[in-house]
Image (cartoon, rainbow, N blue to C red):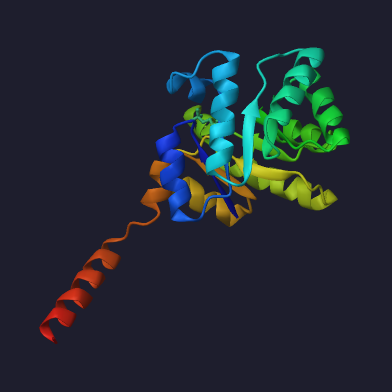
Amino acid sequence: MKFFIDTANLDQIREAQDLGIMDGVTTNPSLMAKEGINGKENINRHYVEICNIVDGDISAEVISTDYAGMIAEGNQLAALHENIVVKIPMIKDGIKALRYFSDKGIKTNCTLIFSAGQALLAAKAGATYVSPFIGRLDDISLSGVDLISQIRQIYDNYAYETQILAASIRHPMHIIECAEVGADVVTCPLKPILQLLNHPLTDSGLAQFLSDHAGNK
Ligand code: E4P
């Protein structure tokens, strides 16, 4: 399973990259705004900075919602760096844009996926990744992990190569459950990734080893 970090914060991206387990980065307009990155030039520069930190797929989201706008924006984003993946919203013109970029050999990430039908359409249109937002489904009392499982089944039935990128991850159990049901990728903030490290028996076991070693000197 691939691990992406879901942030536009360069310090967090560097810290995750230093772990040596990162395969890519996802961002969205809200995450950019949270870092105070505004305006097309600054945003594009920020994407390039991210690409220079992590050697993997870096999702950059279009703001346009019409076909022509998404094509123009997506082509500009893809030209920034070879690792850019054009992130396209799950709307009607988005499906057409996914097909355009897929035919052109440009990687895409179809975002704001909340149903199996949407994931099926995105796969038909040749999306490289689909991003089901599992935390936001949990927020409205629907199971996000069940959706990942359903999409896995459908993609396996027809050998679709579109990768399931589980997004909107809120805690470490989301990561484990996504791994259990066969998500190809999880994208999450740094915190739940670091929380995977923790176990009290590891802490007490290590303390005992170090104490025994010190007594045996
Ligand atoms: C994914 O690409 C999105 O950026 C992200 O995972 C959304 O997460 P949120 O629901 O915590 O905003």
**Residue at the bottom extreme of this rendering:** 216
111 to the left or right of 96: left
Q: Which residue sits at x=51%, y=55%?
A: 21
Looking at this view, is 132 or 189 the one in front?
A: 189
Comparing 119 with 36, the one in front is 36
Q: Position of residue 24 (x, y in %)?
A: 58, 44
Image side of residue 8 versus residue 157, left or right: left
Observer able to see residue 51: yes
Q: Taking 155 as reference, is 134 above or below it?
A: above
| Quadrant that contains the N terminus | bottom right
Residue closest to the far right = 103
Quadrant of the drawing holding the C terminus: bottom left
Image x and y of residue 138, in percent: 50, 34
The residue depicted at 40 percent of the width and 54 percent of the height is 196
- Looking at the image, is 177 positioned above or below residue 70? below
- x, y (%) of residue 14? 44, 43
| Residue 167 seen by the camera | no
Where's residue 9, x and y in %?
A: 44, 32
Q: Is residue 105 left or right of residue 7?
A: right
Q: Residue at x 59, y 17 (%)?
A: 41
Q: Identify the residue at horizontal 78%, vertical 33% (top origin).
A: 122
- The front one of 164 and 206 is 206
Is 85 situated above or below 93?
Answer: below
